[in-house]
Image (spheres, rainbow, N blue to C red):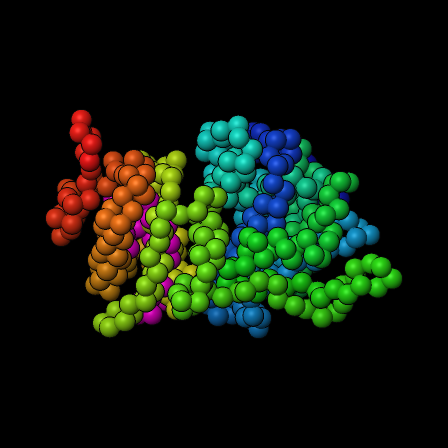
Amino acid sequence: MATKENASEKLVFQAEVKQLLHLMIHSLYSNKEIVIRELISNASDAADKLRFEALKDANLYEKDSELKIRLSFDKKKRTLTISDNGIGMSRDEVINNIGTIARSGTKEFLNNLTGDQAKDANLIGQFGVGFYSSFIIADKVTVITRRAGTSEGIQWESQGEGEYTISEVEKDARGTDIILHLKKDEDEFLSDWTLKSIIKKYSDHITLPIVMKKSEWKDGEEVPTDEDETVNAASALWARNKNEIKEEEYNEFYKNLSYDQEPPLTYSHNRIEGKQEYISLLYIPTKAPFDLFDRERHHGVKLYVKRIFIMEASEKLMPNYLRFIKGVIDSADLPLNVSREILQDSKEVEAIRAGSTKKVLDLLEDMSEKKPDDYKKFWKEFGVVMKEGHSEDFQNREKLSKLFRFNSTHEE
């Protein structure tokens, strides 16, 4: 049911979304910083989508190809705004992405809650429901968006209760502005220093620049100037020289990539040159994910071509029995218009898959010999799926056999 009031349409949230909003507002408030992390992550995804669509239609850039994310705040209005000049959303996309669970993992998220606030907060990003975390710190959220290549701007607004309004608005620039009308006790999100600290902590390795206005102290108060500054490192971690990367940076990148708050068990960072040129950064998690045994679900590493994000969960780059591996593969050779269909029959992809599989198995072999206690932990979490490799990966059968462990009445 929808009613029109002053050219704005009032719509009702789906039942699962209502349940989720109630949970966000009343239960998942232990780590409020995740709101910023999730909204920045969504903005980064919007930029990735624009880059990908613009490969076929460069006009989508609308003479503005310098992609960035901007955070700004207004102490008088008590608003915090996260803006991007990414792909933006049409009216239908706004309704589908925010008002319903058609394309989000809302239902699965609710089914996997543990009751532990910290753990449940970390599930937010994993299930693609990060936008709703806005209501942890805001009593009203306004979204103003325009999809690249269209002229119609859309405004979505809700107080996080049972309904939302949607209307057409003017918006000159493509992309999305998310305006959080902050609750009374959320003054920390009106602090330049706090926001920049959160960006550094959670989003330093987002490859887009995250900009804010420089601030200065005037009459004992922090005020923004007219000058922009980039807050994050804004570089692809995997493309840097591994000798220059600290352990904490690898771990933080893993957390951003996997939405897993535990550091990885180990990782392998390689630059391969020769017939195939690519970079791989592959992580072995400490704990098995909730969907490890769901073979139908998309698993796999993120695929980039020349630093441009191409696709999530690129399962053709890793065999199914290694579906728990998280990471990034950045190819210099694959075409930018690569699709899942092209990946299916590509010799280049076969070579990357074989090379990456070997790196993971070598990493595990090294762990089993040098860190047997860590390997025991690994086998306990992932041994069952590793055994699938014996019937799937004939080329590496001998290598796999050495990695297998079996229950015994004797000490190993």
The count of marks equals 0
Q: Quadrant of the N terminus?
A: top right
Give the x, y percent position of residue 73: 73, 55
Camera-side residue of 91 and 338: 338
Q: Quadrant of the C terminus?
A: top left
Q: Quadrant of residue 138?
A: top right
Residue 62 on image: x %, y %: 57, 69
Q: Position of residue 90 (x, y in %)?
A: 57, 52
Which residue extends farthest front? Answer: 411
Q: 204 left or right of 405?
A: right
Does any portion of residue 209 appear in the rendered image?
Answer: yes
Location of residue 66 with respect to 395 vertically, above or below: below
Q: Residue at x 22, y 62 (%)?
A: 351
- Front one among 129 and 403: 403
**Residue 257 visible within the image:** no
Say whether residue 320 is magenta.
Answer: yes
Residue displayed at 55% across by 52% down? 202
Say which quarter of the image contains residue 25: top right
Bounds of the magenta segment: 314-337
